[in-house]
Image (cartoon, rainbow, N blue to C red):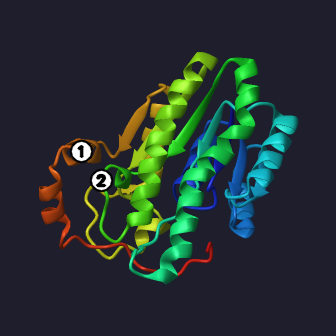
């Protein structure tokens, strides 16, 4: 098995790397933080190729994909996991760069990750493309306009892609995590219902990928909550969210 993973230097991406390494897979790992990436790769008992790439750089991702295919062959699974989160407020002009970065990384990063592999998967007649979205894409959350918008766009994009890829023999799985214990959620100061360990969550996600599930929410309890959220009338949603906790409004180095 060959697996290519973005956002592999921490959190869900790192847990995916450990999980597939435990199955003996050959890995291609992508992240911006080279030192962390190399440390993770060094601890895995399988062949690993690392690529220090920002997923906003389509050309760099294409070169990484070309190198991986040349060295190991076409991957069986490509996981577009790289993503960022930060509180944003439309009223603040200085939040403009954060909006832009979040949308580019969380949405265009999916396109740039998948695109270089599609022709090779099509020629082979098989492959799995996996996009990590979020339950935050189901309804808009106050103080997280950019993040919610990016994940809603990711869900819709992946649905379109799934229909496009099916006749080519390529499966597409959308994963919408709830609260998973990672550095991204460690900054949240509010209660996170059904918080799940990343390794446990990834084992469930990997089962969904292996079984060619179209859309999966992890943990499952958040899946039922997502179904409920979809049908709440706007006036009730506004009332429920008016005092909801907001994402931390922090400065990150990816701007």
| Residue of label 2 | 139
Q: How many marks?
A: 2
Query: Where 163 falls versus 142 (above or below)?
Result: above
Q: In this rendering, would 192 be left or right of 12? A: left
Q: Secondary structure at mark 1?
A: helix
**In the drawing, what numbered circle is on residue 230?**
1
**In the drawing, what numbered circle is on residue 207?**
none
Q: Nearer the viewer, residue 125 or 43?
A: 125
Q: Secondary structure at mark 2?
A: loop
Give the crowd class for mark 1: few <14, some 14-19, many >=20 residues within 10 Å: few
Camera sees residue 133: no
Q: Of marks 2 and 1, which one's residue comes earlier in the chain?
A: 2
Q: Who's the residue at 41% across and 46% down the image?
A: 176
Query: Where 20 falls versus 42 (above or below)?
Result: above
Q: Nearer the viewer, residue 89 or 44?
A: 89
Give the crowd class for mark 2: few <14, some 14-19, many >=20 residues within 10 Å: some
Image quarter (top left, top right, bottom left or bottom right) of the N terminus:
top right
Is disc 2 in contact with disc 1, using a CB cutoff of under 8 Å? yes
Q: Who's the residue at 44% across and 30% down the image?
A: 214
* Rendering coords of residue 103 (x, y %): 53, 60
Q: In this rendering, would 172 be left or right of 17? A: left
Image quarter (top left, top right, bottom left or bottom right) of the C terminus:
bottom right
């Amino acid at each position: 098995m060959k697996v290519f993973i973005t956002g592999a230097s921490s959190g869900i991406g790192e847990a995916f790397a450990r999980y597939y390494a435990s199955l003996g897979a050959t890995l291609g790992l992508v992240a911006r933080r080279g030192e962390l990436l190399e440390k993770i790769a060094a601890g895995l008992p399988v062949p690993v190729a690392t690529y220090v790439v920002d997923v906003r750089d389509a050309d760099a991702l294409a070169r990484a994909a070309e190198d991986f295919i040349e060295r190991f062959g076409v991957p069986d699974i490509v996981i577009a996991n790289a993503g960022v989160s930060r509180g944003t407020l439309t009223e603040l002009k200085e939040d403009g760069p954060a909006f832009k970065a979040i949308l580019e990384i969380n949405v265009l990063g999916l396109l740039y990750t998948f695109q270089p592999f599609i022709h090779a998967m099509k020629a082979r007649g098989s492959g799995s493309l996996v996009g990590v979205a979020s339950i935050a894409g189901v309804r808009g959350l106050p103080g997280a306009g950019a993040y919610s918008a990016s994940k809603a766009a990711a869900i819709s994009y992946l649905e379109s892609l799934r229909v496009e890829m099916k006749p080519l023999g390529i499966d597409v799985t959308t994963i919408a995590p709830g609260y998973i214990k990672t550095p991204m959620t460690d900054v949240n100061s509010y209660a996170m219902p059904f918080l799940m360990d990343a390794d446990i969550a990834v084992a469930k996600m990997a089962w969904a990928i292996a079984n060619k599930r179209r859309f999966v929410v992890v943990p499952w309890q958040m899946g039922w909550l997502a179904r409920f959220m979809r049908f709440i009338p706007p006036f009730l949603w506004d009332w429920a969210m008016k005092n909801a906790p907001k994402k931390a409004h922090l400065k990150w180095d990816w701007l």
